[in-house]
Image: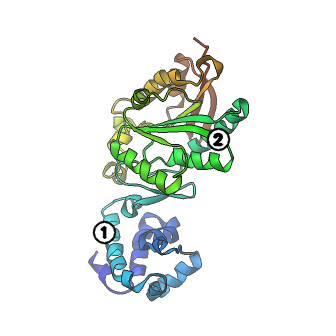
Amino acid sequence: MGGRTSGNWLLDWEKTIKLYDPDNVVYIASRCLGLWQFGHELSLTEYVNLRSRPERLTELIPAAAAAELQKKFRAALRRRDEGEPWAYIWGQINFLGREFFTDTSVLIPRSDTEILWEAAVAGAKKIFQQRGRALRILELCTGSGCLIISLLNELAALNIPVELAVATDISAAAIRLVERNRQHLCPDLPLVRLTGDLLEPVEAAGLGEFDFCLANPPYVTPAEYTALPDEVRNYEPRLALTDEIDGLDFYRRILHDVKLYGRNSKAAALYLWVEHGMTQRDAITEVAEAEGWLPVEYRDDYAGLPRVCGFCYEQNAE
């Protein structure tokens, strides 16, 4: 890192960032330079101008902040060179057009989870059209809360009322982060945050029945975990990645337990959408059918790989 202490430090930094994320240089420049703090995001043209004349930073950043910013900028470079993900370095990540706070207590939100969000939005529309009443929604293994918060904002934009939304996670640090994101992105929307293992805190709180449930649980097997990139294994929480068994344990538990939380028991079906690994669709479907669930949809991710299962449980099936 010593070579970056002189000369055009922005160009030196660009060489580094291109090693890691060549397609997002402009976005990452805005993040790492902290320009959003001053109400400014870089356009491509501005970035090209800035890299040839880095002294223009003084036009974008208050003089009093410039020295401290350059210090943080170099510290960020060192952290990235050591392998730390950008999202943890600047403490934020964009998910579906919104900036979510993130830290090492949770997995970094990934684009694959947008597929689960799309399924949830489509499902919520259909359920609301059928039932004509405010929805009750449950998310298990919420992590940063990016999924449930994005869903609540979208439903509000669609004028679909939500009576209650509950998000649970076994990590107290994750639930604190969910609260921070809630205050930042949906302070007026109904979101209850509960710390505990899957449905245990829901039962303890007596929150009862739901129209549908979402979950993106740990699904990496121990063998797969050892093969993950260093920046995942060394920084993202193992607790949120693997069940330490076979990658299916959380699905077994969810599919067995959540069916007891359908709304108005025999009056309406309960729906469940889950994200999963690319080889797990058939195994999860087999578990679901053994528990009395009916498959209602499957969705692939942007790479065309299996990513989301949707199931329905008829309350009077047993």
Q: Is residue 35 left or right of residue 306?
A: left
Position in image of residue 262 (x %, y %) = 56, 24
For disc 1, the marked residue is 78
Q: CA distance from mark 2 to mark 1?
A: 46 Å
Position in image of residue 297 (x %, y %) = 64, 32
Residue 93 to residue 130: above or below: below
Q: Is residue 24 left or right of residue 77?
A: right
As rendered, which of 106 and 189 lies closer to the eye?
189
- Residue shown at 48% from the left, 51% from the top: 182
Crowd band around label 2 with a 10 angstrom C-alpha radius: few (<14), some (14–19), many (20+) = some
Q: In which quarter of the view is residue 128 placed? A: top right
Q: How many discs appear?
A: 2
As rendered, which of 140 and 22 lies closer to the eye?
140
Residue 58 to residue 163: above or below: below
Which is in the foreground here, disc 2 or disc 1? Answer: 2
Which residue type does callout 2 highlight? Pro
Which residue type does callout 1 highlight? Arg
Crowd band around label 1 with a 10 angstrom C-alpha radius: few (<14), some (14–19), many (20+) = few
Secondary structure under tag 2 reads: loop
For disc 2, the marked residue is 161
Secondary structure under tag 1 reads: helix
Position in image of residue 25 (x %, y %) = 49, 70
